[in-house]
């Protein structure tokens, strides 16, 4: 029985030794083992080993470990360290290289320990090392590295639509005036995940600027969105003169903007006029529709030397009497009054038309008939006249306007007896004129013709003969009046005797 008990003790001791020896290699393997099937990036590296060397690390050389400097977010994973052989030294076994990353992202999220290089901005503890081999000893280094936000310049901001508004008398920028605010520095892959906000927006000037460019100032611009922390805005103006750009969480930026003139209506006010042979409106007024103006602004409108409004239609000018709208095309401009900038407004109607119709009324003219005579029994001659335009001033103006003429004719009082007669307007007419007659009384006279002794010439064959050709032959000469001559001589003798006898008596 004692032997049996001793044997059992020996057997138990042997089993304990076997168990200890069986688990010892597992501990060693756990100390230096690795998984060769995990790939990170383009390098195959071990997922787990302690950088304290292994049973093969008998070398004396120290691998070169390099850490990245001034790392900036670029939207991709970035290896922040490298493990390289010494110059002209043997190559390293890539499977014995391990680089781990652990830290805190800029957005506050934790980045757990990982073999995968980080992408996002943040501060990371980077451990880089080599397990060691026959040439190199096991070696590791640790460094804290920051991935900084990608900087966006204030001059690189833009909007998907031009910034523009209609003049409203203020520097305020409407809420919907900024559309698609973005920056050219944002990576294309992040466009949907980066948003820009601002506290307020206002114009530099309230007025329309025709000679330069206006701008909108966005106050306190900030970046939001899922990728907002990956970017920062940099004031690219060196305000403090140190030659460095300053990142900022929020900053004011300037964007090119425009203010367009406010459209206003110009009203053409015409006037009735007396016919003057022209379709041109002589007197007019140009008014601005006051409801179109911003409160406090004053604007006037005037016509240039080439401004000639007319009666009629847009296509036809009417000079004759009637009722017409008055029209004008171009030739008028705006003037700002009492500090109002005329560039802030624009006339919306290049062609103007009056709201009302205006009349062209007949011109008054006076017809003065000429003094006309005729011999009793003869036809009436044409009754002539002169026309004078009535004027509001002194005197008259002779004639009608332009090439105007009067149709019809004057008439006279009826009668054919010797004497004077009145002259009337008769059918004389032109619808553009109001005719009145002056001095028409006794302006037509019929006179008696002069008495003439008629000599009868016979038609005897003895007095006229025709030639064979039908011509009248020469008339025969009248006989000499001898009897008349003799009677005249006797009369003269008798007179002589009578005066001679009286003379002799006186002498006695």
Image (tube, grey):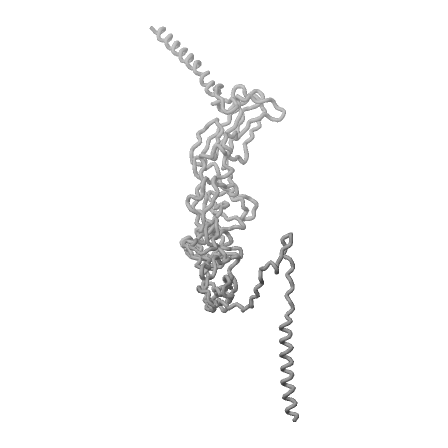
Please name whichever residue, 494 or 435, is drawn nearer the observer in this view of the structure: 494
Please name whichever residue, 285 or 173, is drawn nearer the observer in this view of the structure: 285
Query: Considering only vertical position in the picture, is 384 above or below 332?
Result: below
Query: Considering only vertical position in the picture, is 292 above or below 368?
Result: above
Query: Considering only vertical position in the picture, is 306 above or below 1?
Result: below
Q: Position of residue 251 (x, y in %)?
A: 47, 45
Q: Position of residue 69 (x, y in %)?
A: 55, 34
Please name whichever residue, 263 or 276, is drawn nearer the observer in this view of the structure: 276
Residue 436 visible in the current orientation: no
Residue visible at 64% across and 79% down?
492
Q: Residue 110's image quarter? A: top left
Residue visible at 64% across and 75% down?
486
Q: Residue 111's image quarter? A: top left
The quarter of the image holding the C terminus is bottom right
How many marks on residues?
0
Q: Position of residue 311 (x, y in %)?
A: 46, 54
Q: Position of residue 333 (x, y in %)?
A: 50, 54
Q: Residue furthest bottom?
A: 508
Residue 15 visible in the current orientation: yes
Please name whichever residue, 124 or 43, is drawn nearer the observer in this view of the structure: 43
Q: Residue 11's image quarter? A: top left
The quarter of the image holding the N terminus is top left
């Amino acid at each position: 029985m004692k032997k049996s008990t001793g044997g059992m003790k020996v057997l138990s001791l042997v089993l304990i030794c076997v168990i200890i020896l069986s688990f010892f290699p597992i501990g060693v393997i756990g100390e230096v083992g690795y998984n060769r099937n995990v790939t990170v990036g383009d390098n195959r590296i071990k997922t787990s080993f302690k950088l304290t060397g292994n049973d093969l690390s008998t070398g004396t050389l120290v691998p070169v470990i390099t850490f990245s400097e001034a790392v900036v977010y670029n939207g991709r994973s970035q290896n922040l360290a490298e493990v390289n052989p010494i110059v002209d030294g043997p190559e390293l076994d890539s499977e014995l290289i391990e680089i781990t990353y652990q830290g805190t992202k800029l957005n506050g999220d934790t980045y757990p320990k990982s073999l995968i290089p980080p992408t996002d901005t943040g501060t990371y503890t980077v451990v880089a090392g080599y397990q060691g081999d026959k040439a190199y000893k096991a070696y590791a280094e640790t460094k804290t590295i920051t991935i900084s936000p990608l900087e966006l310049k204030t001059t690189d901001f833009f909007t998907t639509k031009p910034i523009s508004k209609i003049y409203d008398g203020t520097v305020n920028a409407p809420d919907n005036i900024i559309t698609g605010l973005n920056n050219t520095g944002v990576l294309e892959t992040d466009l949907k995940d980066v948003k820009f906000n601002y506290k307020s927006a206002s114009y530099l000037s309230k007025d329309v600027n025709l000679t330069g460019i206006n701008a909108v100032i966005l106050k306190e611009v900030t970046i939001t969105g899922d990728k907002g922390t990956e970017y920062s805005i940099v004031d690219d103006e060196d305000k403090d003169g140190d030659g460095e750009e300053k990142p900022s969480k929020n900053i004011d930026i300037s964007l090119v903007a425009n203010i367009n003139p406010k459209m206003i209506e110009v009203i053409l006010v015409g006037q009735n006029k007396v016919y003057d042979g022209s379709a041109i409106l002589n007197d007019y007024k140009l008014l601005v529709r006051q409801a179109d103006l911003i409160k406090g602004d004053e604007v006037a409108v005037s016509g240039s030397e080439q401004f000639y409004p007319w009666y009629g239609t847009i296509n036809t000018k009417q000079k004759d009497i009637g009722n017409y709208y008055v029209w004008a095309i171009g030739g008028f401009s705006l003037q700002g009054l009492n500090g109002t900038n005329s560039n802030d407004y624009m006339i919306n109607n290049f062609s103007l038309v009056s709201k009302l119709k205006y009349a062209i009324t007949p011109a008054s003219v006076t017809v003065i008939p000429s003094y006309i005579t005729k011999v009793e029994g003869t036809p009436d001659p044409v009754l002539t006249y002169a026309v004078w335009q009535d004027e509001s001033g002194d005197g008259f103006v002779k004639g009608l306007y332009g090439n105007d003429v009067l149709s019809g004719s004057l008439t006279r009082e009826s009668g054919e007896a010797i004497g004077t007669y009145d002259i009337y307007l008769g059918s004389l007419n032109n619808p553009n004129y109001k005719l009145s007659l002056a001095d028409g009384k006794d302006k037509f006279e019929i006179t008696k013709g002069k008495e003439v002794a008629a000599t009868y010439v016979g038609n005897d064959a003895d007095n006229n003969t025709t030639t064979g050709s039908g011509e009248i032959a020469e008339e025969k000469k009248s006989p000499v009046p001898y009897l008349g001559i003799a009677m005249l001589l006797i009369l003269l003798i008798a007179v002589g005797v009578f005066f001679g006898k009286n003379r002799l008596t006186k002498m006695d």
